[in-house]
Image (cartoon, grey):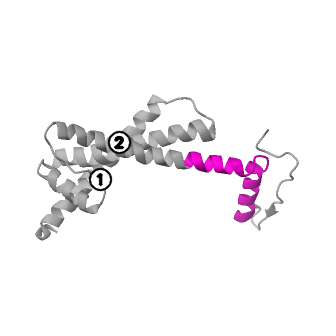
């Protein structure tokens, strides 16, 4: 069974004054939905929604598992860092990490607890969506994983530097 119903006629396209084709957004969206789900009905929509929700849950789950693993390793080496799940705990985490210096703070808070979890979470999300929704699954591509982790590391460093500056200014208002 194909996604496209061959018996439907295409939408009428009106020409604007400049000669470009113009389809109102509502008509295009309705046409796309009827073309995609007209044979499969609500079951396909529920399937796609459930896969998307599972992918988002996996994204969040991988991020939390990574943070727990990093904090467990730190705990094994004697460094007690609270898991930054809400604002007050984030302040405690920043206070615990500030004593280590700027480089270690950026590495731990920015890269290990922010950037890399997002990178691995995005890769997990992409894996699930590619495998179950788009059906264009070719396995995990190491080049894609590499560039995602490089980008996540850069974002983590930027986040770590930003939070370092923000926490230093919060501790010493005379510097601002």
Marks 1, 2: nearer the viewer: 2
Q: Position of residue 161 (x, y in %)?
A: 24, 53
Q: Residue at x 42, y 48 (%)?
A: 60
Nearest the eye: 50 or 23: 50
Q: Quadrant of the N terminus?
A: top right
Q: Position of residue 107 (x, y in %)?
A: 23, 44
Q: Main secondary structure of the magenta part?
A: helix
Circle 1 sits on which residue? 159
Residue 153 visible in rendering = no
Pick whichever of labels 1 and 2 is earlier in the sequence.
2
Q: Residue at x 57, y 38 (%)?
A: 130
Q: Is the residue marked by circle 2 packed among few (<14), some (14-19), or many (20+) residues within 10 Å?
A: few
Residue 126 visible in rendering = yes
Q: Is the residue marked by circle 1 packed among few (<14), some (14-19), or many (20+) residues within 10 Å?
A: some
Check residue 28 for magenta coloring: yes
In this image, 153 relative to 4: left or right?
left
Q: Any mark on residue 65, and which? A: 2
Nearest the eye: 60 or 18: 60
Q: Quadrant of the C terminus?
A: bottom left
In this image, 117 relative to 18: left or right?
left
Q: Residue at x 49, y 30 (%)?
A: 140
Q: Any mark on residue 168, and which? A: none
Asked if the residue at tag 2 contacts the one at tag 1, i.e. Cβ–Cβ closer than 8 Å, the answer is: no
Q: Residue at x 16, y 61 (%)?
A: 168
> For the residue labelled by badge 1, is the local secondary structure a helix, a strand or a loop?
helix
Q: Which residues are magenta?
A: 24-52
Q: Position of residue 62 (x, y in %)?
A: 40, 42
Asked if 125 appears above or below 91 in the picture, the reply is: above
> For the residue labelled by badge 2, is the local secondary structure a helix, a strand or a loop?
helix
């Amino acid at each position: 069974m194909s996604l496209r119903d061959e018996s439907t006629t295409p939408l009428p396209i009106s020409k604007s004054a400049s000669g470009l084709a113009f389809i109102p957004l509502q008509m295009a969206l309705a046409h796309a939905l009827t073309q995609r789900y007209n044979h499969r009905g609500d079951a396909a929509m529920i399937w796609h929604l459930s896969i998307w929700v599972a992918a988002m849950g996996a994204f969040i789950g991988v991020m939390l598992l990574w943070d727990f693993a990093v904090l467990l390793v730190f705990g094994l080496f004697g460094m007690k860092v609270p898991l930054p799940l809400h604002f007050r705990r984030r302040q405690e985490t920043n206070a615990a990490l500030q004593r280590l210096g700027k480089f270690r703070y950026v590495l731990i808070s920015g890269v290990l607890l922010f950037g890399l979890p997002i990178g691995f979470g995005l890769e997990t999300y992409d894996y699930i969506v590619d495998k179950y929704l788009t059906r264009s699954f070719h396995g995990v591509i190491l080049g894609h994983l590499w560039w995602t982790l490089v980008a996540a590391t850069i974002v983590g460093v930027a986040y770590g530097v930003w939070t370092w500056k923000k926490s230093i200014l919060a501790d010493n208002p005379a510097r601002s």
